[in-house]
Amino acid sequence: MLEKNRKVLIIDTNHEILIRELTKNGFQCDYFEGFTRNDYHSIIGNYFGVIIRSKIKFDKEILEKAKNLKFIGRVGAGMENIDVDLAKSLGITCFNAPEGNRDAVGEHTLGMLLMLMNKLLKANREVRNGIWLREENRGLEIKGKTIGIIGYGNMGSAFSQRLSGFEANVIAYDKYKSGYSDEFVKETNMEEIYSESDILSMHVPLTDETRFLLNNEYFNNFKKNIFVINTSRGNILKTDDLVNNLKTGKILGAALDVLEYEKLSFENIDTEKLPESFKYLIASDKVVLSPHIAGWTIESKYKLAKVMAEKIINKFGV
């Protein structure tokens, strides 16, 4: 029987390889279907590690009860549901796994861009309804456009790599990174992003610094009218301000995999009670939407779990 300091609490379901690899390397993995936050509070003190996706937040309340915890693993990229600073101060290592879904996000972002610029949402609907309009659905080419990427980590770099065959001018700004110019991208500053971008793609985490970063003031800094893509987090973009700029033409179109309103229960929502700005988005031919699935592929489910297992084993394996 393993001691409690080798026990790992699995809070969300993941690809089976995660538990298989951890078990093979001496960890006992426990998963309790149907458990609530209060249930986890009562048992967290028994665990050496915990693995989560998005079911609960690891905040001060639960971290202070995690007396034996040595690591928290998030099977995903964003860490906003973990108080990372507090965890680190308590000696808890925090892992994430952006390497596991970077390819999926890069491909999805490119797909949304192509759909947006070629009016495929509108054209698909029209043809299915017996409407055959060619001139009205004339699109734009990526070739020759300047694509500004904000945030050049795993996701931003994966997107730039997939743009390499389109003969676009790809530039990127990352406040916390430098020296990354290569055959795929040119490192730049915000002044060039504002002056040259035809397309803006966001790849930043949600922090106090980035919350509602995209707002009227931000959009007004751009010299050109632009397309906007957001596959990072919904709350980096103020939807009311996006809609205002879509109406004025400052924003030519938007592709959003994430929404400010994600906490709403879309399965049971009353469409009459939707926020007015969201009503505008879903009615607009200039907007492409998907339900936070940019990193959600068959392959990424496996890779995320595999990357997480490898990081934990490399650090804490016997």
Image: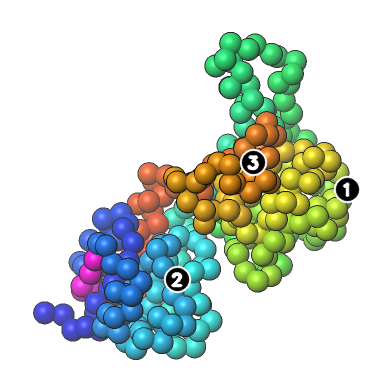
Count neighbours of disc 3 (C-alpha within 10 A) and say few if under 14, some if 14 to 19, many if 20 or more: few
Q: Quadrant of the N terminus?
A: bottom left
Hey, which quadrant is residue 313 in on the image?
Answer: bottom left
Q: Amino acid at mark 3?
A: Lys
Count neighbours of disc 2 (C-alpha within 10 A) and say few if under 14, some if 14 to 19, many if 20 or more: some
Q: Amino acid at mark 1?
A: Lys
Residue where numbered disc 1 is placed: 223
Question: What residue span does the magenta drawing correspond to?
Answer: 25-32
Q: Amino acid at mark 2?
A: Lys
Residue at horizontal 66 percent and vertical 65 percent from the top: 211
Position of residue 213 in the picture relative to residue 256 (left or right): right
Question: In front: mark 2 or mark 3?
Answer: 3
Q: Please say whether residue 30 is one of the residues in the magenta stretch.
A: yes
Residue where numbered disc 2 is placed: 57
Spot occupied by residue 68 in the image (x, y as percentages of width and height): 32, 87
Position of residue 184 in the picture relative to residue 145 (left or right): left
- Residue 128 or 270: which is nearer the viewer? 270
Residue at horizontal 43 percent and vertical 79 percent from the top: 93
- Residue 69 or 278: which is nearer the viewer? 278
